[in-house]
Image (spheres, rainbow, N blue to C red):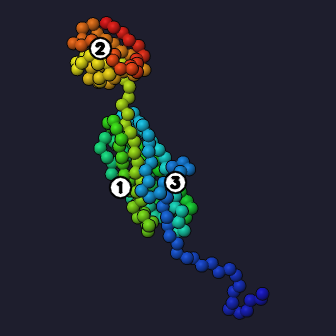
């Protein structure tokens, strides 16, 4: 149609305020607010690193503000996130990593709070768990300091029960000679002095 004076024909686009929505992903798995991601079993004093994505599945820009961590005892934490404030367009993602290092055996939990302008979850909580596993030493020497029981860690130096990768040395005159009284005792090699 012809335009008359003072009138313009065309498309009128209306911008409607939307809402940002933060979502955390690891690989193709989505982790909703309050979810837990398990690193599995990691040898004590060994660092395990996982890469995650912060995704804005909302309809307006998401502003990442800062991060708060609450590490538990027996675990150290390091992470890399964009410098706040960081704006993420609708549908976009940004990667980050979190490294956990158990410093003692057993289950450890770290709470990660990602702060943003997501109105539903301004503090997006993601719990991270890791199980610290004692590494099997590659060499031990029998001390017999506690008893005659092969399966007692206090009878070995360093204090750990031998496994299938462990070279075992038994000296000639320990206070107690070793006795294998349970099934499953293994070692890679055995030297008797």
Label 2, secondary structure: give it: loop
In the rendered image, the quadrant that contains the C terminus is: top left
Identify the residue position indicated by label 2 in the image.
178
| Mark 2 in CB contact with mark 1 (< 8 angstroms) | no
Q: Measuring 33% from the left and 48% from the top, which residue is drawn there?
A: 71
In the picture provided, is 103 more to the left or to the right than 54?
left
> Disc 1 versus disc 3: distance between alpha carbons?
21 Å
> Disc 3 versus disc 2: distance between alpha carbons?
52 Å
Q: Earlier in the sequence, mark 2 or mark 1?
A: 1
> Disc 2 versus disc 1: distance between alpha carbons?
50 Å
Q: Earlier in the sequence, mark 3 or mark 2?
A: 3
Q: Quadrant of residue 159?
A: top left
Mark sitting on residue 30: 3
Q: Quadrant of residue 39?
A: top left
Residue 97 shows in this picture = yes
| Mark 3 in CB contact with mark 2 (< 8 angstroms) | no
Q: Nearer the viewer, residue 156 or 180?
A: 180
Q: Measuring 34% from the left and 38% from the top, which residue is drawn there?
A: 106
Question: In the image, is residue 93 above or below residue 133?
Answer: below
Q: Residue furthest bottom?
A: 5
Q: Measuring 39% from the left and 59% from the top, which residue is drawn there?
A: 66
């Amino acid at each position: 149609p012809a335009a008359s004076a003072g009138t313009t024909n065309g498309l009128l686009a209306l911008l409607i305020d939307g809402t940002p929505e933060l979502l955390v992903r690891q690989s193709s798995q989505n982790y909703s607010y309050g979810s837990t991601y398990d690193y599995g079993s990691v040898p004590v004093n060994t660092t395990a690193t996982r890469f995650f994505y912060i995704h804005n599945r909302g309809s307006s820009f998401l502003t990442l503000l800062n991060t708060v961590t609450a590490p538990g005892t027996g675990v150290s934490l390091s992470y890399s996130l964009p410098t706040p404030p960081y704006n993420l367009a609708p549908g976009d993602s940004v990667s980050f990593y979190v490294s956990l290092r158990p410093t003692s055996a057993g289950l450890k939990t770290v709470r990660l709070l990602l702060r943003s302008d997501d109105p539903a979850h301004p503090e997006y909580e993601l719990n991270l768990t890791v199980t610290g596993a004692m590494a099997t030493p590659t060499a031990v020497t029998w001390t017999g300091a506690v008893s005659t029981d092969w399966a007692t860690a206090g009878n070995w130096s360093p204090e750990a029960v031998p496994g299938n990768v462990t070279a075992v040395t038994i000296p000639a005159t320990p206070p107690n000679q070793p006795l294998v009284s349970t099934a499953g005792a293994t070692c890679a090699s055995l030297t008797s002095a």
